[in-house]
Amino acid sequence: MAWTRNVLRVNLTEGTVSVEPLNMEWASQYLGQRGLASKYLVEEIDPRCDALGPDNKMIMVTGPLTGTMASTGGRYSVVCKSPLTGTIACSNSGGYIGAELKNAGWDMIIFEGKSPLPVYLYIRDDKAELLDATPLWGQSAWKTDELLHQMHQEPQARVACVGRSAEAGCLYAGVINDLHRAAGRSGVGTVMASKNLKAVICRGTKGVGNIKDPLRFMQATEDAKKVLRDNEVTGQGLPAYGTQVLMNVINESGAMPTYNMRETQFEGAHKISGEAMHEPRPGDGKPNLTTNAACFACTIACGRISTIDQGHYTIRNRPEYWKSSGGLEYEAAWALGSDTGVDDLDALTYANFLCNEDGFDPISFGSTVAAAMELYEQGVLTNEHTGGIEFKFGSAEALTAAAEMVARGEGFGLELGLGSKRFCAKYGRPELSMTVKGQEFPAYDPRGIQGMGLAYATSNRGACHLRGYTVASEIMGIPEKTDPLVTAGKPELVKAFQDAAAAFDSAGICLFTSFVWTVDDIATQVDAACDGEWSGEKLLEVGERIWNLERDFNLAAGLTGKDDTLPKRLLKEADQFLVAAAVT
Ligand code: SF4
């Protein structure tokens, strides 16, 4: 089985919870997590509904391998219609709460309606109840996590919740779990807050215990773990440097989006790289990185745990930030760093802590700040708009002040919380927004990695690296090297990555395994765990089916093929480095 076959339905308007069986026909077609929850959403909501209205639904969902001994099998996703893009949204997170939900006996939780008052959902195995969240409303995600553990005296329970940014309507707020893991993209946290749902706290003690062929599954997962251990990316690079292993690599390849994507190389990249996180700081002589960390069952352990120099200006008023917390991943380091021109590693770490503490997406936030800096440079935005802050490229003070305002939903932070598309449109310069379908770009400039341009343009949730990561082939040569500066062959490459990513996501494992595992490696594990027969070929069919389902939702929501494009800057403006590279 691997699925628990139980769905928890929570009607927030009525304040009721009910149990229903999982639709196994859909499970056999869409596998789990991203695919299966998307099927439920498509069947249950009007794609044209207001994403922040009661007719939108929010689904927390696990995959069949979530909570099992499969490496990285701790993933869960939040699926809903996005308030940022108007498309279907699926935001995936690691940590431990996915496994906890599964061990409590639930494949998914469907939240519908809107509560008249703030509530949270408490789950302990079969028991699930909505409780008053009034004391939690207005608290950060970190404080909410702490308070819920105090209230329930359940140290092993796991919490997923929203912070103040979501409550204030920041359109790229995420759902934070386990303090520094996030279903971070597309504003899924904003949807959660719009329903007056502050948190889910869950403790599961039942165990998964429903594997089709336990001995074969044990062997398949052990074999697959060895493959991860023996590979230099998943066995050495990611544990040592995290995804920050990419900072210098992408910068040297000329695909580092910089200064609101005006340039493709950042002169300060080495100062904010994974290597720099290991080096002694000038201030206290300690490295930024304390240790690496792993999500549930993960044998890669790419997570970063960091501290800030206790003498740094950011923690004068926040001394508790001296304590270690979730450090910079490559996506956060790029968006907060090179795109804004800030090369102060401590300032970036501080802004990243704030993103986790109050639950907002560092990619969308950093990109929106970068757009604001370009508007400021052009004189469109002045100190009157920013509350007196000089919003210059390279200003660590502007970046960290902006993060504080978005975190608390205060002042100019409310405007930055609109996201780059709405923000630039408000100031009459929509062409300065670096977005697709309203979602901000991740850390790979498509002028330097052509396949990513197509992947971004056609992504079903707006600009996103996780929907078709052709970087693996074009930069890293996985599974084989393709030329990043040509377009020939890229449609086929993009489609192959898109279908595979949908299958990986839907199994309940981490996409980082795809640096090494093929769909056949996933199929071996899924087939030993789940009813039915599962091959790599079948998983790719499932991936394609999921992709088309998402696409149909978006078309019904009002999007068209005209939305599958890139900003004019990326289509028409050649960066100087790329011109030089083409000439030499
Ligand atoms: S590879 Fe990293 S993000 Fe993925 S499950 Fe492991 S620790 Fe979490």
Image (spheres, rainbow, N blue to C red):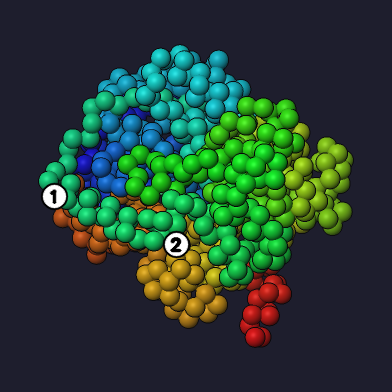
Picture coordinates of residue 48, whole percent (x, y): 50, 46
Q: Could you say which disc has been placed on residue 468 in the image?
A: 2
Q: Residue furthest bottom?
A: 584
Picture coordinates of residue 113, whole percent (x, y): 46, 29
For the point 83% across and 49% down, which residue is it?
A: 381
Picture coordinates of residue 425, whole percent (x, y): 73, 52
Q: Nearer the viewer, residue 180 or 50?
A: 180
| 350, above or below 122, in the image | below
Gap between marks 1 and 2 measured at Cα:
31 Å
| Relative horizontal placement of residue 533, taking residue 360 as reference (left or right) | left
Q: Nearer the viewer, residue 86 or 364?
A: 364
Q: Secondary structure at mark 1?
A: helix
| Relative horizontal placement of residue 306, taking residue 97 as reference (left or right) | right
For the point 64% across and 62% down, which residue is it?
A: 257
| Three-letter amino acid code at the position of disc 1 | Arg
Q: Residue furthest front?
A: 285
Q: Could you say which disc has been placed on residue 216 in the image?
A: 1
Q: Earlier in the sequence, mark 1 or mark 2?
A: 1
| Three-letter amino acid code at the position of disc 2 | Gly
Q: Nearer the viewer, residue 222 or 515?
A: 222
